[in-house]
Image (spheres, rainbow, N blue to C red):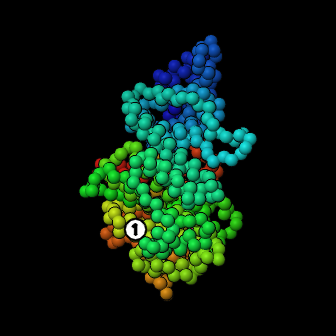
Amino acid sequence: MGVFQGEASKDKYVMQADELTGGSVERFLSKNKKFGKVFDTVTFHISPKSHKKLEKVVLVGLGSKDKLDVYSLRQTCGFIGKNLTKDTATVALYLPSGVKLSENADVVVTGLLIGMFDSGHHKTNGEELKSKVKVESITLVSGENVKPDVIQKGLIIADALNGAREVVNKPANIITPEYMVTFAKKMAIEGKLKIEVFSEKQVNDMGMGIMASVARGSEEDLYFVVMRYLGAGSKGPTLAIVGKGITFDSGGISIKPSESMEWMKMDMAGAAACFGAMEVIAKLKPKINVICACPLTENLPSGKATKPGDVVTGLSGKTVEVINTDAEGRLVLSDALTYVQKNFKPDYIVDLATLTGASLVALGNVATAAMGRPQDFVDQVIKAGEQTGERMWQLPLYDEYRDMLKSYIADIANISPGRGAGTETGAKFLEEFVDKKQKWVHLDIAPTAWEEGDKPYISKGATGYGVTTLVELADNLANKK
Ligand code: BES
Ligand code: ZN
Ligand code: ZN
């Protein structure tokens, strides 16, 4: 039972629970007036004499009523979900009317399932297989009239989001570019989406030499996946989503230090979020066209790999001096951005990428860095995030950051010489490949794609960040919100 801080004792459902526990609930609440903070819990056992089936009542804090927002609701439900997996079979979850379940049931359901999900285990003793949840059913109890399609939406989103988490968590020897293609193809077939998969040779032949330069060091082939959902006909609005899909980022010849390098299996989280969003969009069918374009490759050193100082040419005709092969995300994305603009003339573009460590330094594990233009569109994307509990914080795209990317030999360098503004210069590099009038937002999800510790509401690892924002944005744009 969810209880708001300081309001529990007035709730009639809580009073029913009080009866079942022989007055323990009321006694506890009157002694603990501050109970109800987010992540507060207390358990009361019910004797078989009071009720044949109900074994216990657990009160869970929802925080103070006026502070409840989608972000805290998603976390609280994640917390409930994560704890349910420990020993529970059948659950009834009661949320008081302040939660506005008729509007927020999707967030509740998604939050619960995010919390219950634990993925990617390869332990053979099965001990750690928490994903084998014992929960058989969850009944939502509410005084409100909740439409089944809101619940359904929550289930669809959670499914795709957890699916994305699964692939991001899995190691790079399993999740190769080719595996990602299989994942995308399966999804496209199920969702009746159009899909094109360009091989490394095709990418080269088409002139996407910046993208291809990243794959040169790897034994695995590069693939460029383009998926299309057509929900609005040829005159309707078109949103393009572009995801960074580096299945492993060693840094290439500019090799990373070995400490924490294993983490770089998550460098395809942008692509995974885009695929997850397409899976949802194919099911919820908003009235908008959505193009999803994801370059998929490894970034590895070898005798064939791109070297610092190499100059490569992209589909736009622009040349890039690759000063640092570890700044590879912007390289693959630049050609993907050119490709979607040339072929689909989208009204809007959003790219998602674990692009810079600097964004993690700036924002911690708390918010995504958002940059783009015009401001209206940046606001729209940030709002879509707010509506679904995914935080973003805008950083600037001042012209000075472009000056920092000057190359003496090519049109642009892929990094700036100094240590400052790493996230902004990354975005500025991408902006070079975005037409002047194109509405575009770049989301640097390096801070939010991964939870380093085991949080009370989500297990360690991939978060699936971006799926819900993209779905909400597509929906908002379709409804001109
Ligand atoms: N994939 C990394 C960025 C990253 C770092 C993501 C940490 C998640 C967590 C990216 O390709 C990279 O290596 N960026 C460099 C850019 C630098 C060479 C300008 C970085 O952030 O150090
Ligand atoms: Zn890198
Ligand atoms: Zn990377």
* Residue in view at x 38 percent, y 28 percent: 145
* Residue 302 visible to the viewer: yes
Q: Is residue 82 left or right of residue 274?
A: right
Q: Is residue 396 above or below residue 157?
A: below
* Residue in view at x 41 percent, y 78 percent: 317
* Residue in view at x 62 percent, y 52 percent: 170
Quarter of the rendering containing residue 43: top right
Q: Classify mark 1: residues with Cα within 10 Å, few (<14), some (14-19) or many (20+).
A: many
Outermost residue toward the top in this view: 49
Residue 99, horizontal then vertical, whole percent:
44, 35
| Disc 1: which residue | 339
Tag 1 secondary structure: helix
Residue 62, horizontal then vertical, whole percent:
51, 37
Q: Nearer the viewer, residue 248 or 148?
A: 248
Residue 286, horizontal then vertical, whole percent:
34, 47
**What amino acid type should be assigned to the residue bearing mark 1?**
Tyr
